[in-house]
């Protein structure tokens, strides 16, 4: 199963819940997980930036989760792409990437 988690909130408690949901999926032995993506846009882009209070939690996802951040959200919040955490890639448009992933058969989960 391929799953994309979508996070837009700038609230740190929402970030924690979202990361918890991702971890719960990965830890669920009853689900065959092929690929997991955590895509953020809007104010949630701060989760993936250096200095995020949950930066270590994002880094801990390692190779198990593909972390994607919206370039439009970076631009709109004056965050240079160079400030993204090392395990985060940018995509031109978060909503565009969500559309592509869903077209490719990813289950869509809006979190929190």
Image (cartoon, rainbow, N blue to C red):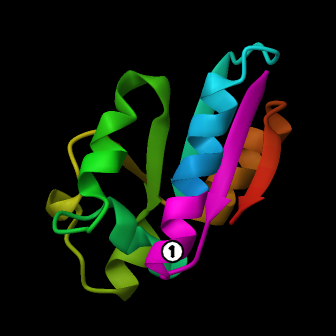
Left/right of residue 72 with respect to residue 112 in the rendered view: left
Residue at x-position 65% and y-position 37%: 24
59 relative position to 40: left or right: left
Work out whether residue 45 or residue 81 is closer to the camera in this orientation and state it.
45
SS of the residue at dot 1? helix
- In the displayed structure, would residue 44 be above or below residue 95? below
Q: Quadrant of the C terminus?
A: bottom right
Residue 111: percent from left, percent from top: 70, 62
Determine crowd level at label 1: few under 14, some 14-19, many 20+ residues with C-alpha closer than 10 A: few
> For residue 29, what is the image quadrant?
top right
Magenta residues? 1-17
Left or right side of 6 for 9: left
Q: Nearer the viewer, residue 25 or 84?
A: 25
Q: Where is 12 relative to 78, above or below?
A: above
Give residue 14's quadrant in the image.
bottom right
> In the visual, does 65 lie left or right of 98?
left
Position of the N terminus, as image quadrant, is top right
How many marks the image carries: the answer is 1
- Residue for badge 1: 13
Q: Can residue 61 be seen by looking at this rendering?
A: yes
- The answer to whether residue 41 is visible is no
Q: Nearer the viewer, residue 93 or 31?
A: 31
Q: Is residue 12 magenta?
A: yes
**x, y percentage for residue 104?**
79, 31
How far across and how far down the image is residue 34, in percent? 68, 16
| Residue displayed at 52% across by 51% down | 19
At a point 28% along the width and 41% down the height, the residue shown is 59
Q: Residue at x 66, y 50 (%)?
A: 5
């Amino acid at each position: 199963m391929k799953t994309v988690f979508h996070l837009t909130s700038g609230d740190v408690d929402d970030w924690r819940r979202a990361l918890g949901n991702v971890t719960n999926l990965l830890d669920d032995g009853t689900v065959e997980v092929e690929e997991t993506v955590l895509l953020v846009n809007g104010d949630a882009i701060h989760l993936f930036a250096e200095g995020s209070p949950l930066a270590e939690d994002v880094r801990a996802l390692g190779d198990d989760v593909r972390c994607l951040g919206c370039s439009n959200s970076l631009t709109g919040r004056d965050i240079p792409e160079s400030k993204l955490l090392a395990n985060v890639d940018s995509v031109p448009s978060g909503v565009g990437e969500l559309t592509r992933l869903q077209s490719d058969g990813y289950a869509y989960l809006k979190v929190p």
